[in-house]
């Protein structure tokens, strides 16, 4: 099976400085033409954490559907600001669960389990010690399950040689510089893939629209399983 996976931090659909314009982000997601997209910062930060990316627009604009789970609040699209979009047929064959993560800030991951692979969307903490603990928790969870796995998201880690030690047994893929989107310098967005997953192609999606729609560029990878 070959699928395209992607990760995209939406920055609450405000671009670099505003205004709030989810249509731009949806157009970027459509450009990615991915089968599974892990999204970060899909909700506003304060109060009831209402959705910044309107759920009602997603399927018509992208052909993808949000995975169904209990969000942070009644008006939220995500959990800790995260959600996973996927082709509807994949969601019919899969199951999703929330994975609480340790750290000083409230953080969590989402795991979409499909036949042959578990895809985990993350938005790791701002402190390196928290990121190490969060990745360690994820690896311990994933090693208890059968099948291949892929961790994707905003790792909030700009170093390649520090903070990612719990991923030593996986293939770490950093497709390119993604932040800040207007003039990317740091590689904050990454994939970590188990050894049975073959990478066919990958990249950072750097287009004029992507540079305007968020403070992060999205990343993508074509992978083969089995």
Image (tube, helix red, strand yellow):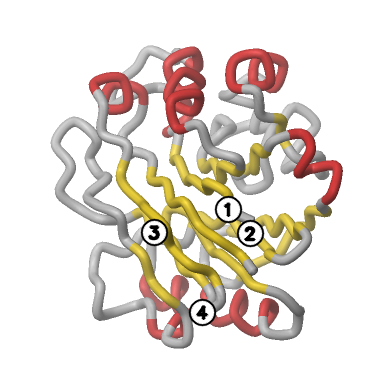
Q: Give the residue at mark 3.
A: 190
Which of 49 and 164 lies nearest the eye of the viewer? 164
Q: Give the residue at mark 4.
A: 195
Query: Is the Cβ of the residue at disc 3 closer than 8 Å to that at disc 1?
Result: no
How crowded pointer 3 is (Cα within 10 Å; few <14, some 14-19, many 20+) is rated as many
Disc 2 or disc 1, which is closer to the eye?
1
SS label for mark 4: loop
Which badge, 2 or 1, comes first in the chain's sequence?
A: 1
Q: What residue is at 48 percent from the left and 67 percent from the top?
A: 198
Say if 50 sits above or below 1 in the image.
above
Q: CA distance from mark 1 to mark 4?
A: 15 Å
Q: CA distance from mark 2 to mark 4?
A: 14 Å
Q: What residue is at 41 percent from the left and 78 percent from the top?
A: 129
Q: CA distance from mark 2 to mark 1?
A: 14 Å
Q: CA distance from mark 3 to mark 1?
A: 19 Å
* Residue 63 in picture, x, y percent from top left: 65, 23
**Of the numbered discs in the image, which one, if any, rests on residue 2?**
1
SS label for mark 1: strand
Disc 3 or disc 1, which is closer to the eye?
1
* Residue 108 in picture, x, y percent from top left: 63, 59
**Of the numbered discs in the image, which one, if any, rests on residue 119?**
2
Disc 1 or disc 4, which is closer to the eye?
1
Disc 3 or disc 4, which is closer to the eye?
4
């Amino acid at each position: 099976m070959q699928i395209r996976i992607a990760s995209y931090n939406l920055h609450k659909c405000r671009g670099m400085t505003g205004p709030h314009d989810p249509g731009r982000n949806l157009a970027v997601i459509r450009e990615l033409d991915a089968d599974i997209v892990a999204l970060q910062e899909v909700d506003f930060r304060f109060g009831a954490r209402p959705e910044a990316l309107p759920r009602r627009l997603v399927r018509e604009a992208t052909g993808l559907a949000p995975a169904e789970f209990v969000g942070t609040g009644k008006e939220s699209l995500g959990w800790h600001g995260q959600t996973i979009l996927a082709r509807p047929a994949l969601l019919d064959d899969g199951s999703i669960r929330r994975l609480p993560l340790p750290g000083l800030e409230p953080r969590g991951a989402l795991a979409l389990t499909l036949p042959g692979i578990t895809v985990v969307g993350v938005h790791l903490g701002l402190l390196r010690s928290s990121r190490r603990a969060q990745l360690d928790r994820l690896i311990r969870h994933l090693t208890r399950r059968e099948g291949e796995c892929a961790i994707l998201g905003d790792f909030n880690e700009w170093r390649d040689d520090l903070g990612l030690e719990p991923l030593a047994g996986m293939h770490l893929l950093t497709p390119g510089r993604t932040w800040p989107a207007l003039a990317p310098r740091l590689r904050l967005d990454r994939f970590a893939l188990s050894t049975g997953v073959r990478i066919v192609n990958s990249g950072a999606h750097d287009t004029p629209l992507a540079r305007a729609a968020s403070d992060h560029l999205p990343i993508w990878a074509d992978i083969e399983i089995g």
